[in-house]
Image: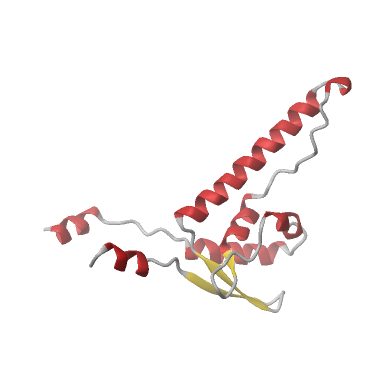
Amino acid sequence: MNKEAIFAAAKPKVREVEVEEWGVRLNVRAHTLRSRMALLDADTINADAVEEYERDQALPDDERTGVERVERFDAAIINFIHSIVDDNGDQLFDLSDHDRFRDLSYATLVSIHMAIQQVNEVKPVSFTDLKKNSD
């Protein structure tokens, strides 16, 4: 096996999830390192913006710089945005959809979250088995 065969075969898992309440089937994709880093970056950028707003609000009124109000992202919703894909495997939602998710059924979101967790399940590697295979 060569590296091109490995990279060609190493596609992230996609799982179809029935969402009865919405009358649709969603595709949830396992994270790649790139998508996981994008998720973490979005969360960090948001947290920084929230902190900047809060620092500005802590100042006396006449010293505030007018930083626009920013609400903290929900980590699960960011995960939805980076995990739900269309039939081509492209991300279906973006960060501008975040607040719209807040008004959806909690029970439905939990079931989608569970499917995302399952598709991203990390199974422990047995180093003993690896050692046996390398001998």
Q: Residue at x 76, y 59 (%)?
A: 100
The residue closer to the viewer here, 21 or 82, is 82
Q: In the rendered image of this protein, does residue 26 appear above or below residue 61?
A: below
Image quadrant in which you'd find residue 102: bottom right
The residue closer to the viewer here, 128 or 94, is 94
Q: Quadrant of the N terminus?
A: bottom left
Q: Position of residue 16 (x, y in %)?
A: 55, 75
Q: Residue at x 59, y 65 (%)?
A: 84
Image quadrant in which you'd find residue 53: top right
In the figure, is residue 100 to the left or right of 26?
A: right
Query: Residue lying furthest right in this view?
Result: 62
Q: Position of residue 42 (x, y in %)?
A: 61, 47
Q: Position of residue 57 (x, y in %)?
A: 80, 28
Q: Quadrant of the C terminus?
A: bottom left
In the figure, is residue 123 to the left or right of 38?
A: left
Q: Residue at x 59, y 56 (%)?
A: 79
Q: In the rendered image of this protein, does residue 135 appear above or below residue 64?
A: below
The residue closer to the viewer here, 28 or 104, is 28
Q: In the rendered image of this protein, does residue 55 appear above or below residue 128?
A: above
In the figure, is residue 75 to the left or right of 22?
A: left
